[in-house]
Image: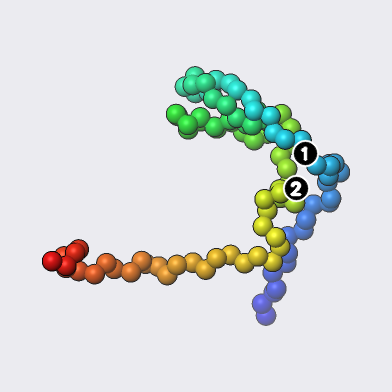
Amino acid sequence: MTRWPHRARLPQERSESTAPLSPPELTEAECRRCGTYIAGLDGRYACGVCGWVNDHSEGHRRLPTADEDPDRPPKGRRRPKQLPWPPPEPPEGPPYPC
């Protein structure tokens, strides 16, 4: 007999405020790896020169949840269909007719 999989138990509701977040603050610092001057949002940085990224927990405030994201797609939206794989082979022969 096969057992049905159980859903993961969700943690209890967070007691954090659900008030709208203020806009992010632009912050600047030096990269800890290569010293390049970089900018980030709310103390979260990523260096485009060497690829260093600081941990998200080092930010100045909490990150918004998915429900607080104004650009989140509406519920019930379906994912776009994937293209067939592998891609079709290009036709053989000269690329342009003479």
Residue 94 falls in which quadrant of the image? bottom left
Residue indicated by mark 1 = 21
**On-image quarter of the N terminus:** bottom right
Q: Nearer the viewer, residue 23 or 28?
A: 23
Residue type indicated by callout 2: Glu
Residue at the bottom extreme? 1
Q: Nearer the viewer, residue 3 or 84?
A: 84
Side of 76 relative to 82 (left or right): right
Residue at horizontal 60 percent and vertical 30 percent from the top: 40
Residue indicated by mark 2 = 68
Relative to 44, residue 88 above or below: below
Side of 18 relative to 36 (left or right): right
Looking at the picture, how far across and down is residue 89, in whole percent?
29, 68
Looking at the picture, how far across and down is residue 97, in whole percent?
16, 67
Looking at the picture, how far across and down is residue 46, in whole percent?
54, 32
Residue at horizontal 67 percent and vertical 57 percent from the top: 73
Relative to 67, residue 97 above or below: below
The crowd level at tag 1 (other Cα within 10 Å; few <14, some 14-19, many 20+) is: few
Q: Are marks 1 and 2 in contact (CB under 8 Å)?
A: yes
